[in-house]
Image (spheres, grey):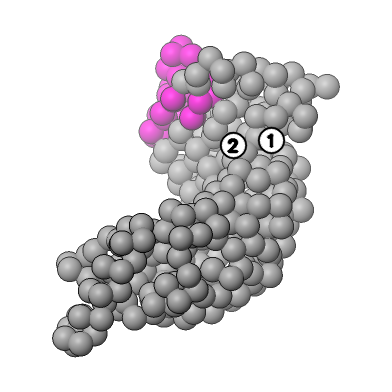
Amino acid sequence: LVIPVKAADAATDIVAALKAKGAEFTETKGVVTGVSFRDCTKFTAEDFARLKQLPLLKQVSLGLGCNDATFAALGDLPDLENLGTNGFSGTDEGVRTLTRFKKLKSLSFFHPGKDYTGATLPALAELPGFESLTVGGSMKFNDKSMESVAQLKGLKGFRTWHTGVTHVGAIQLTALPNLASLTLGHDLNPAYKAELTDDSLTMLSTITSLESLALMEAKLSVAALAKLKALPKLKRLTLDSCIFSDSDLAALKKELPKVDVRWNPPTDAIKQRIEALAQSATK
């Protein structure tokens, strides 16, 4: 890629101005390809609009203060592939507008506000390359939201944890024919029905496209996890902060000899919360 001198000078000025206000940039072979705004409240609509003058901007990360107006201010970024948010306070209708990013592949929402439910996610199905979605830290994202996720038939990767999704909603994942990577975790709030139990493994063992599976913050038995041997493409299984043991791990590796099984033990605090949630699931 050859960038005209004037365009390169303009890009340099934009980067310098935004860096002075706290933006962070990443470069690939001397060209800016990513930008992160940890605190969007420090930037104006004009600041965000200037991003369209950066050739090959592929990744944008938006933090505190990100809302519908922020999305609108981004304008049209023709090469945007990855959009991440943390603390999004906008609405479902604002998310619908993301269909203008024709090359969008990946979208993530960490700790979105109460006005985001995922209701307009099906609109993203029109994007030919859209393949990865993450939602974490929102009780408004629930079983109804999973009906929307199920309409994104092109999804290859999906991650959700600390949300209002229960085992009932997770069943919607079986409608995704291309799902290769999945991360599923608890809310860790005993007031809600457990999302991950041994019964969940019966459903997960039917998603035959899975190559990588991560299960978070759950109490699962070796016998239930062994059902995953029905997945012909499974290469990696990660048990993150799950109640397990070294002997369980050894037994599971024997059941799944062709799978890279990894276990990250929970802290004492998380272990107590998992136990409380497991008890609530049996009531």
Callout 1: helix, strand or loop?
Answer: loop
Quarter of the image holding residue 52? bottom left
Q: Which numbered circle lies on residue 195?
A: 1
Tell me if label 1 and label 2 are in contact, CB under 8 Å: yes
Q: Residue at x 54, y 34 (%)?
A: 215
Residue at the top extreme?
A: 247
* Above or below, 146 relative to 278: below
Q: Residue at x 54, y 24 (%)?
A: 242
Q: Amino acid at mark 2?
A: Gly
How far across and how far down the image is residue 196, in percent?
A: 65, 32
Label 2 packing within 10 angstroms: few (<14), some (14-19), many (20+)? many
How far across and how far down the image is residue 145, in percent?
A: 71, 54
Q: Which numbered circle lies on residue 185?
A: 2
How far across and how far down the image is residue 69, in percent?
A: 59, 70
Question: Can residue 54 be spotted in the picture?
Answer: yes
The residues colored magenta run: 239-264
How far across and how far down the image is residue 244, in percent?
A: 52, 18
Answer with left or right where residue 125 lies relative to residue 20.
Answer: right
Q: Viewer-proximal residue, 190 or 76?
A: 76
Q: Viewer-proximal residue, 275 or 39?
A: 39
